[in-house]
Amino acid sequence: MRAAIFNGAGKPITIERVPDPVPGRDELLIEIGRCGICGSDVSMTSGSPFDYAVGRCFGHEFAGTIVGKGRDTPGWNVGDAVACMPKSGCGHCEACIEGRPLFCPTGKGVSEAFAEYLSVPASVAIRLPEGFSMSDGALVEPMACGLRALGSADMRGGERVLVLGAGSMALAVVWWARRLGAASIVVASRSAHRRDTCLAFGADALHAFDEDDPAELARALGGAPHIVVECIGKDGALGLALEHVRLGGTVVSMGMCTQPQPIIPAVLAFKEARLTFPLAYSPEEYARTAREFDQSGFRPDIMVSDVLPLEQVGDAIASIRGGVRTLKIHIDPRIAP
Ligand SMILES: [Zn+2]
Ligand SMILES: [Zn+2]
């Protein structure tokens, strides 16, 4: 099969012929239908200390169709459409017992979906509800991160929510904030061209960034925000979020900034605000994401701006890094190059 291989920062991502995966006893063989390019795929191929291992395939936002299975996979059938979490846990360490297998230190990563096929433990798969496209399925993963973000802020409903940035993480947060009963949701972004998409996901308004005027954003929200979710990840964004948050509020860092950020603890202390750093969802949050798309009739694939063949993974990542305006890029390995 064909698979995209990371060869180290600054080198081209190449498409290699590698052996077809063979499913183990408890595994499903998935033909990849869609795999999304995540912001982390850009930052983790950039020469940072967090880069992917050289010589391996990557890609973790995926959905596909079962085309083979091991003996111990009851309940699964060839032909089922599935979405998959990118890691399975060992089942008995502290992280797994606490319901957070994505943090399992010995778990098996299955994030190599920029390829035609991938074998995954059946435990990471969920069946896609009727009517879901492959692209909806591949968005369950990033959309579940939005649920986790607001969970980390103990959102109960009735909060004013400010979202900094208008990329796919921001849209996930907006959708869940609406679903969880936010009183008001404002997106602050330089990308005013994403206004319609933000509103379609449930935002009340999109404001062009005005770093100097938290009061203007507070007016749009009906008061200072209880929750500020930072989805930019660039220098200064976290500090900006701290300025905006209200007394007793929560700043959620979702931008995955890999650079040191100066924070003045007193700014937080004067408001008794707190700061959270969510990374990933639990299996329940992942399944709930697909279930609530199904119940609400919402189809997240309106955020997909481009669908490209496998051969263009490297160029697409380079163009995102270069600042080209795309929203969510999906790779479909079934498209001929
Ligand atoms: Zn991701
Ligand atoms: Zn474990």
Image (cartoon, rainbow, N blue to C red):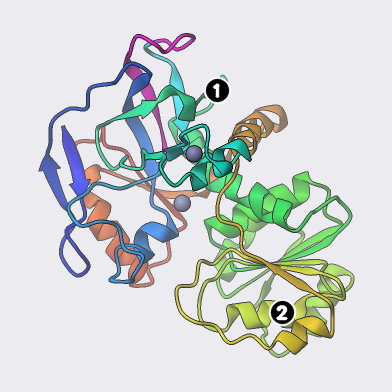
Residue 197 visible in the picture? no
Frontmost residue, 296 versus 236: 236
Secondary structure of the residue carrying tag 1 is loop
- The vertical placement of 258 against 73, above or below, is below
Within the magenta stretch, is there residue 69? yes
Mark 2 or mark 1: which is in front? 2
- The vertical placement of 117 against 318, above or below, is above
**Which corner quadrant holds the C terminus?**
top left
Mark 2 lies on residue: 242
Q: What residue is at 70 percent from the left and 48 percent from the top?
A: 176
Q: What residue is at 52 percent from the left and 72 percent from the top?
A: 233
Within the magenta stretch, is there residue 59? no
Secondary structure of the residue carrying tag 2 is helix
Between the C-alphas of marks 2 and 1, the distance is 41 Å
Between discs 2 and 1, the one toward the N terminus: 1
The residue range painted magenta reads: 62-77
Seen in the image, is 222 located left or right of residue 273?
A: right
